[in-house]
Image (cartoon, helix red, strand yellow):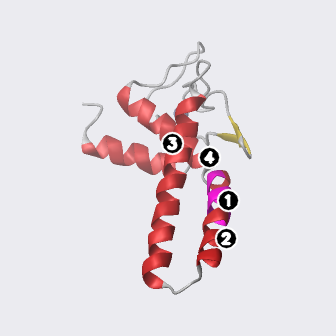
């Protein structure tokens, strides 16, 4: 019931907007490059046990590699740039993309965890959708 296509689309939509994957009402970001501990609205925990962040880092690394490959093939097929220029562009992408994608890698990882396992609740009494 929890994983019907509509739920998955809603959860992914929330993740793109950096909102809580469970309720979609509160942002997951405390300040740039810093995640909230839990959702202000429904109380699910965003920062779980030690090591949970590894998944978010992995999502960021994989997304960066895929993006670099796409840019590389696009440059190769659509332009006549020199190897040196291509390398400079790819290097810039490799440095900038993980920073730009940082929050989204977290939100995607949280969304996946929500869909597969369900995020844990804080102890306080929380509302549910
Ligand atoms: Zn929430």
Where residue 96 is drawn, which disc sits there?
1
The residue lying at 59 percent from left, 76 percent from top is 83
Report the residue marked by disc 4: 103
Q: In which quarter of the image is the N terminus?
A: top left
Q: Mark 3 points at which residue?
A: 59
**Viewer-side label of 1, 2:** 2
Q: Is residue 19 above or below residue 97?
A: above
Q: Mark 2 points at which residue?
A: 88
Depth check: give the residue in front, 42 or 20: 20
Task: Give SS at disc 4.
Answer: helix
Work out whether residue 54 or residue 65 is closer to the camera in this orientation and state it.
65
Report if the beta carbon of the residue with label 2 is closer than 8 angstroms to ligand 1.
no
Q: Which of marks 4 and 1 is nearer the N terminus?
A: 1
Disc 1/disc 2 C-alpha distance (Å): 12 Å
- Indicate which label's residue lies in the foreground, 4 or 1: 1
Label 3 Cα crowd, 10 Å radius (few <14 / some 14-19 / many 20+): many
């Amino acid at each position: 019931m929890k994983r019907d296509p509509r739920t998955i689309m809603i959860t992914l939509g929330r993740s793109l907007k950096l909102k809580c994957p469970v309720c979609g009402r509160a942002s997951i970001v405390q300040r740039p490059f810093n995640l909230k501990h839990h959702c202000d609205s429904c109380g699910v925990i965003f920062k779980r046990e030690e090591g949970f962040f590894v998944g978010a880092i992995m999502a960021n690394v994989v997304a960066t590699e895929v993006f670099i490959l796409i840019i590389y093939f696009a440059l190769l097929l659509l332009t006549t740039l020199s190897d040196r220029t291509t390398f400079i562009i790819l290097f810039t992408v490799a440095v900038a993309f993980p920073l730009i994608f940082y929050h989204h890698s977290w939100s995607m990882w949280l969304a996946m965890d929500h869909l597969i396992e369900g995020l844990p609740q804080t102890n306080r009494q929380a509302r549910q959708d």
